[in-house]
Amino acid sequence: MMSRTLWCSAVLLASSAMAPAAETHALIAQIKAVGKEGKGNVAAGKAWRELVQQGPAVLPEVLAGLDDASPIAANWLRSAVDAVAARALAAGTLAAAPLEGFVRDTKHAGHARRLAYEWLVKVDAAAPKRLLPGMVNDPGQELRREAVDVLLKQAQGLFDAKDEDAARAAYQKILEAARDHDQVKFAAQRLDKLGVTVDLTNHLGFITRWALAGPFDNVKGIGFRTAYLPERGVDLKAVYDGKDGRKVRWLEYTAEPPATVADLRKLGLVDLNKMFTDDKAGAAERMREATVYCYSVVEARARRPVEIRAGSNNALRIWLNGEEIFFREEYHHGVEIDQHVGKGTLRAGRNEILVKICQNHQDEAWARQWSFQLRICDAIGGAVPVTVVTQKLPSATGGE
């Protein structure tokens, strides 16, 4: 039987071992409580200083704190990691094993694992060669990109050596793995040169078939905030009162494929100027101060979280299954692929996507663009497979 003295000693040792962990947790919680406009900064600063003094043993827990930290708190925690790791590296006490263990643990946030990776590389120069080959399909975009870069260099060697079969296989692997647009675009261009036609519209998950209704009024910007009838429930057989007293019906529209594989901003592009024109004066004129609704139904195999990403130069609202997941009332701010991101959940089976896009009064040449593109993907940009439900409607101008 353990003596009372030994038992007391064991309790004291256990308590002393637990105290730092409990203290570290409390300090991280104090930092994560920081808010906007300096709220909690004083307490966070004190906690930061105490946390840094605890040394490199706390790095895995501080890194884990980044998983769900707010942007402000993340800045505090990131600087704590850097301060602790820099001091330990200089002293020769920065251990590689805990950092590598954190990097390999994919349940942690990609940006936290990336930070751990950057410090790991400083203490173990062989880590990239060991880790990156297994990160080509990493769930964190921050590490996946670098792994794909390694494949790109290998593929370039094959391309330069004119080993076309091997180069094609290498670039096809890259296309499947890449999530950053520049890498996707480069792989597609290389495959095109190697005689492989790449359908980036489908590969990236763009919706190309829509039902369009409009124009509705947007004089003085009223359309963005006005809930016209399509917002209350889509009836593809309905006839609405539209802009200037015109009758509005739903029409089918199919986006045209881009002329070149490199033009990502044209993928799945719905060009409303091709469809909605004002010809009252006998000559086609671009429709101004107008609102259009775009509707698509897609079927999914299973319930899952998704991102609905759009690009548009116009004021935009997006609903998924009746829930608004994105809005931005700003005109002519430039257009890029994936510039607008709404987050929602696809149901198993039928899902409805409704887009409202408004054009304002400006008539300068640079303000005439009135279009959008939209795709469904996961959190790092991989296309989510869905089937677009065909609508039996009259074809719109520009459709097929």
Image: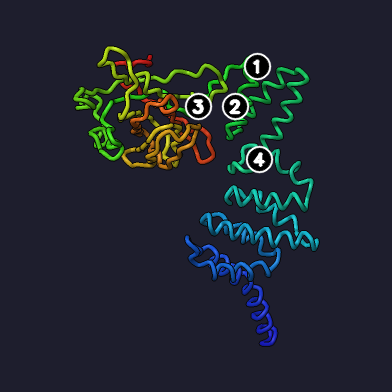
Q: Residue at x 68, y 58 (%)?
A: 82
Dot 4: what SS? helix
Which comes before the other along the chain, label 4 or label 1? Answer: 4
Mark 4 or 1, closer to the camera: 1
Residue 93 rendering spot, x and y as whole percentages: 78, 62
How packed mark 1 is, by other alpha carbons closer than 10 Å (few <14, some 14-19, many 20 or more), is few
Dot 3: what SS? helix
Q: Are marks 4 and 1 in contact (CB under 8 Å)?
A: no
Dot 1: what SS? helix
Residue 191 rendering spot, x and y as whole percentages: 63, 20
Marks 4/3: CA distance? Answer: 28 Å
Circle count: 4
Q: Which residue is mark 4?
A: 135
Q: Quadrant of residue 22?
A: bottom right
Residue 186 rendering spot, x and y as whole percentages: 63, 26
Q: Amino acid at mark 3?
A: Arg
Q: Amino acid at mark 4?
A: Met
Which comes before the other along the chain, label 4 or label 2? Answer: 4
Q: Which residue is mark 3?
A: 265
Q: Amino acid at mark 1?
A: Lys
How packed mark 4 is, by other alpha carbons closer than 10 Å (few <14, some 14-19, many 20 or more), is some
Q: Amino acid at mark 2?
A: Lys
Marks 2/1: CA distance? Answer: 13 Å
Q: Quadrant of residue 366?
A: top left
Instruction: Determine which of the numbered discs, if any, sits on residue 185 in the image.
Output: 2
Q: Which residue is mark 1?
A: 193
- The reply to whether residue 1 is in sight is no
How packed mark 2 is, by other alpha carbons closer than 10 Å (few <14, some 14-19, many 20 or more), is some
Dot 2: what SS? helix
Q: Residue at x 73, y 30 (%)?
A: 153
Q: Is residue 166 above or below residue 385?
A: above
